[in-house]
Amino acid sequence: MKKYSFLLLAAGLLLSACDNDDDDKKVVPEEPAKSASVELEFDSRFGTEDFTRNKAYVNQHGDSVAVGSMLYFVSNVELLKADGSVYKVPDSYYLIENTDQKVREKVILPNIPAGEYTRLRFMVGVDSLRNKSINNAVGDLTISNHMTWEWSTGYMFLNLNGMYYNPASKTFEGLFYEIGKDYNSRTIELDFPASTPKMLVNPEHSPKIHIHANVKTIFGGPNILDVKTEPRIDGTPQHAASSLKVADNYAAMFRIDHIHGH
């Protein structure tokens, strides 16, 4: 009887040991990837100066221009890593505003996965899918932002209003750039500055990317514009060629100046 009891005890110990081995081999689920926010600041400039609304500046054509308000869409934001992998920020449609009523030049990109990033990519404008209809709007694609046309479907990508000096009349007259349509969206990819080639994102690092947005470039990037000849450029067919020139100019207006908290 004692021998039988001993055998049962030994078998029980063996089974318990096997169970412990099984526990050791169980796969522990990985923790979800940690994330943090990233801030983008679009700091308006005019050449090397801080931009001031309604202040007269001389553009590349030699004309005196004063911009009273400027709004443009930044969308489809992406952060890129050195290995070529890309994080696409969901529903990233932001309206950058510099008007008498509101200045909004900072946006927060939430829940950016932890990692090291080396470049920033975004669109000025709205992708063709969202630009087909103003229904089911996401982000800042709302009618209340007054960036849609009453006469045409879609959004204005850039809405710039101001004045220019007309030597013929010796007065300042109205200047209006209302640029939209799919062919005027532009994708911009910016390298990080040499002083900060990599940006670390994790729960202890929520970086801020400081971007200079040079308003002067709108009047003379790849294309030097004569505001006296065309003080109004909009989305109508007769302005298509001129609006393309404006779009190519605003594609060149951005550069990353520095990164905080990298």
Image (tube, helix red, strand yellow):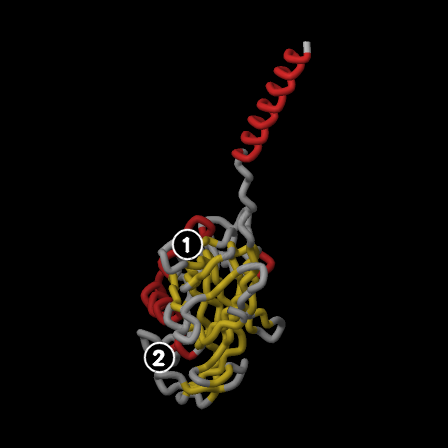
User: Is residue 74 depicted above or below 169 in this figure?
Assistant: above
User: Is residue 251 depicted above or below 84 in this figure?
Assistant: below
Q: Would you say residue 254 is visible in this rendering?
A: no
What amino acid type is highlighted by mark number 1? Answer: Val
Label 1 crowd (10 A; few <14 / some 14-19 / many >=20): some
In the picture of the structure, the residue carrying the numbered disc 2 is 226
At mark 2, the secondary structure is loop
User: Is residue 48 depicted above or below 256 in this figure?
Assistant: below
Residue beneath the point at 50% across and 74% down: 161
Camera-nearest residue between 101 and 170: 101
Camera-nearest residue between 261 and 88: 261
What amino acid type is highlighted by mark number 2? Answer: Asp
Residue 181 is situated, as x and y percent measured from the top left of the image, at 40, 58
Q: Would you say residue 46 is visible in this rendering?
A: yes
* Residue 169 found in image quarter: bottom left
Q: Which mark is residue 86?
A: 1
Residue beneath the point at 31% across and 74% down: 222
In this view, the residue farthest toward the front is 2
